[in-house]
Amino acid sequence: MSNLDLRPPATVCGGRADVTARPVRELLTGRSVPLGESTVVRRLLPHLGRRMIGAWCFVDHYGPDDIAQEPGMQVPPHPHMGLQTVSWLHDGEVLHRDSLGSRQTLRPGELGLMTSGRAIAHSEESPREHARFLHGAQLWVALPDGDRHIEPRWEHHAELPRVTGGGGLRATVILGELDGAASPGSTFSPLVGADIALAAGTDTRLPVRPDFEYAALTMSGEAEVDGVRLAPGSLLYLGCGRSELPLRADVDSAFMLLGGEPFEERIVMWWNFVGRSHEDIARAREDWMSGSRFGEVHGYGGAPLPAPELPPLPLKPRGWER
Ligand code: MN
């Protein structure tokens, strides 16, 4: 997934100032952002009122869209730096290609994890023959300073650990660790991403970590998270300080639980890059436009995405009041 804003705003985030140490319930609604010609996504992060959840710095939710008569997702080759992308589907399939030569069709329940490190480029598309519905989430995780220059890698994990809980709770651990079960996906800071299905009639409590901040992204149904009933496509920020999370559902429901240790470093995020300074971002943009550093994606039927213009003012990791 790429940020396709023609004028993407710079986002400065990270640091403890934004973290709520106590449990809270802040409901954030997404804004619609067009992605290519035929897909509209709901962007939940970054959000005016909330920039990160642990190291999670970008959350898009899309679908379910009926793409039977449509090309579906068509995101041309574009670069990433300083982050991991997490691709997660509830319906349909996405074909991933990258500059390492990876070519992988992702299906529901499988983790597509791309660690950009210093530089990678990829494309994402609905295969020509595709299922009727496309429904999923695209998330980014910021890499800590010590890991953001590592070599890029692509991981595909079709088998992920599951956690079952009281009533009809069934969780898949996508990234990090939940209730003692750990995903095989590489992580670089303490965090969790899990897909949690609640069968109708579930009324339970999920053990969580008081030192993590959490948020819930509803995918389907009407999960009730800590007493707040959530419609699909909204994000409930929960803060820190919980050791368990009350969960209920009157109808079959699913949501993604995102959490992590508050990310202390200040970062600068612009377009598809996470850096620490204006110079980092400007250099990455220049390297993409001149065809260096990020490599080439082969096999996509279209031209790579050009980078938008950089905002005129220097992007600074400090100097923004949040
Ligand atoms: Mn992308």
Image: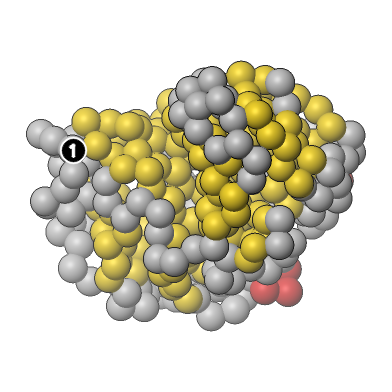
Give the percent coordinates (x, y) of residue 237: 70, 32
Q: Quadrant of residue 166?
A: top right
Image quarter of the C terminus: top right
Task: Indicate left or right for 61 with 70 as reference.
Answer: right
* Image point (37%, 43%), residue name: 90
Give the percent coordinates (x, y) of residue 211: 86, 50
In depth, the one of 111 and 19 nearer the eye is 111
- Residue 247 appears in view: yes
- Residue 285 appears in view: no
* Image point (79%, 54%), residue name: 261
Residue 50 sits above or below residue 2 on the image: above
Residue 212 sits above or below residue 251 on the image: below
In depth, the one of 201 and 266 nearer the eye is 201
Q: Quadrant of residue 42?
A: top left
Task: Indicate left or right for 105 with 25 as reference.
Answer: left
Q: How many marks?
A: 1
Give the percent coordinates (x, y) of residue 210: 86, 46
Task: Indicate left or right for 130 with 91 as reference.
Answer: left
Q: How is the image coloured?
A: secondary structure
**What is the secondary structure assignment of the residue under circle 1?**
loop
* Image point (67%, 20%), residue name: 228
Give the percent coordinates (x, y) of residue 265: 79, 57
In depth, the one of 307 and 108 nearer the eye is 108
Q: Which residue is mark 1?
A: 132
Q: Quadrant of residue 255?
A: top right
Q: For the residue marked with disc 1, what is the amino acid?
A: Arg
